[in-house]
Image: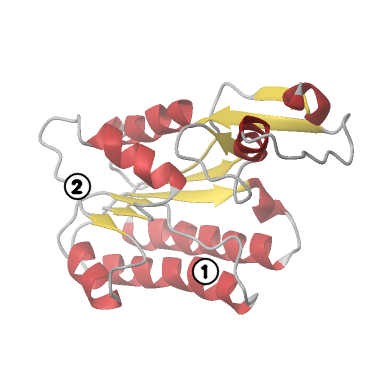
Amino acid sequence: LVTGAKGFIGQNLVAWLARVPDCEICAIDRSHTPGELESALAKVDFVFHLAGVNRPDDEAEFRTGNAELTARICQLLQERDQAVPVVLASSIQALQENPYGISKREAEETVEAYSARSGAYAAIYRFKNVFGKWCRPNYNSVVATFCHNVAHSLPVSVSDPERSLQLIYIDDVVQQLLGELECGREGNLLYREVKPVHEISLGRLLD
């Protein structure tokens, strides 16, 4: 199962999963109902939970789209007899005391508790700034925004050219996620990082 299957990371992961032999993909996105998610969770044997909310109109959506959705997924998995592995897409913002960061940290804690109770394998990724194909400009990547604006002769504003960014490339993200399918299915919890990390200043990136 891939939640957030039509998002930036989800699209890329699904495209690669389609190449994995004997892999049946259950792709869930915002167009699916809670009932369809429940039905999917009743039959899958591995979960990539990539769905989340990062730019809502209402701050309350951080909690419903991140913490509460993760809690519901883990609750439904807990009701099954088998320990289903879960890979969670979190963010380095989980270390921050803002509404988004708090909601992502609560999602992490929910997965930790699920792993401890069920004995299921779990991995949590606190992603840095991910860039690459199918990323939306003016939404979730400064790289995509710069590329879009430069290509369309639109102005680009950089408040601090010396500000340093840590970037990770989408194909490196996906390859590491695919590797989770080969990991042990016993009950342990791992916090993961994607490498390599590319560090660059905003000014140099724009150049």
Residue 192 visible: yes
Give 179 or 157, whichever is nearer the viewer: 157
- Crowd band around label 1 with a 10 angstrom C-alpha radius: few (<14), some (14–19), many (20+): many
Tag 1, which secondary structure?
Answer: helix
Q: Quadrant of residue 156?
A: top right
Q: Is residue 69 above or below residue 160?
A: below
Q: Amino acid at mark 1?
A: Ala
Q: Is residue 96 above or below residue 80?
A: above
- Residue visible at 74% across and 56% down in the picture: 96
Residue that protrudes farthest toward the front in the picture: 153
Q: Earlier in the sequence, mark 1 or mark 2?
A: 2
**Discs 1/2, front:** 2
Give 120 or 97, whichever is nearer the viewer: 97
- Residue visible at 29% across and 41% down in the picture: 14
- Crowd band around label 2 with a 10 angstrom C-alpha radius: few (<14), some (14–19), many (20+): some
Residue 193, position as x, y percentages in the image? 55, 33
Dot 2 corresponds to which residue?
Answer: 25
Residue 67 tag number: 1
Residue 79 visible: no
The quarter of the image holding the C terminus is top right
- Residue visible at 38% across and 73% down in the picture: 72
Q: Amino acid at mark 2?
A: Ile
Q: Is residue 101 left or right of residue 6?
A: right
Q: Quadrant of residue 198?
A: top right
Residue 197, position as x, y percentages in the image? 62, 24
